[in-house]
Image (cartoon, rainbow, N blue to C red):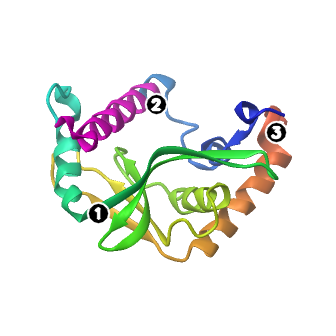
Amino acid sequence: MEEKDYTRVTSVLAPFAGYGNIPKEILDKAADRGTRAHAAINTYLSGFGSWGVDTDIEGYIKSAEVFFPRLGRVIHHEERFFNHDLELTGQCDMIAEVDGIITLIDWKTSSKPNPTWEAQAGGYVTVAPKGIFKRAMFVKLSKDGKDAEIFEYKDLEYCRSHFCDCFVLYKKYFKNNKLEIFE
């Protein structure tokens, strides 16, 4: 199997994220907004500033800018990692020093936190080189430009075990759309 065919961490967690009852057009719009916000954050962190940002994501970028002073050295930025034994891959937004601790950072533009974030952190632990980060921080940006809400996960082994539980269920019931629902 080629790396491009590996299962993605986010694919594993999709059945558990609770988005099944949300209309596709709303999910697509949210995904587009998140993609554009990530691109604007990457542009800013690459030294190009925040000019030309779409008005509907300005608040998210301002919220990120409030967080930026906590960032130290950036170690990885939009890096894709692979676990060849599990044929699993995941792309993290950033690994950087935050308040002096090597931290995985995942930017979020959702309206509310998702309980799968802890398992998502565990997925990144599973695919990234062992010990590359000491904690995970999911940064839920404010659409109004206010301080981001921080979800910090320090017990990475606990996160990894949750992801592995989801991965087992995903492979058994969801991969290749094998789930049968009985009414």
Q: Is residue 81 left or right of residue 28?
A: right
Q: Secondary structure at mark 1?
A: strand
- Indicate whether 124 appears above or below 181: below
**Which residue is painted at 45% across and 26% down in the image?**
28
Residue 60 in the image: state x and y as whole percent: 23, 43
Q: Quadrant of residue 10?
A: top right
Q: What is the distance, in whole Å, between disc 1 and disc 3 at their CAs?
A: 44 Å
Q: CA distance from mark 2 to mark 3?
A: 22 Å
Residue matched to label 3: 179
Q: Residue at x 28, y 61 (%)?
A: 71
Say whether residue 150 is left or right of residue 56: right
Q: Which residue is mark 2?
A: 27
Quarter of the image with the N terminus is: top right
Q: Which mark is residue 72?
A: 1
What span is in magenta?
Answer: 27-49
Residue 94, disc: none
The residue under the point 73% across, 61% down is 164
Which quadrant holds the C terminus? top right
- For residue 108: magenta? no
Across and down, in percent, residue 62 comes to: 16, 45
10 Å crowding of disc 2: few (<14), some (14-19), many (20+): few
Q: Amino acid at mark 3?
A: Leu
Q: State the separation of the CA atoms marked 1 and 2.
A: 33 Å
Left or right, residue 36 beside residue 164: left
Q: Residue 8, relative to residue 123: is it above or below?
A: above
Q: Label 3, secondary structure: give it.
A: loop
Magenta includes 35? yes
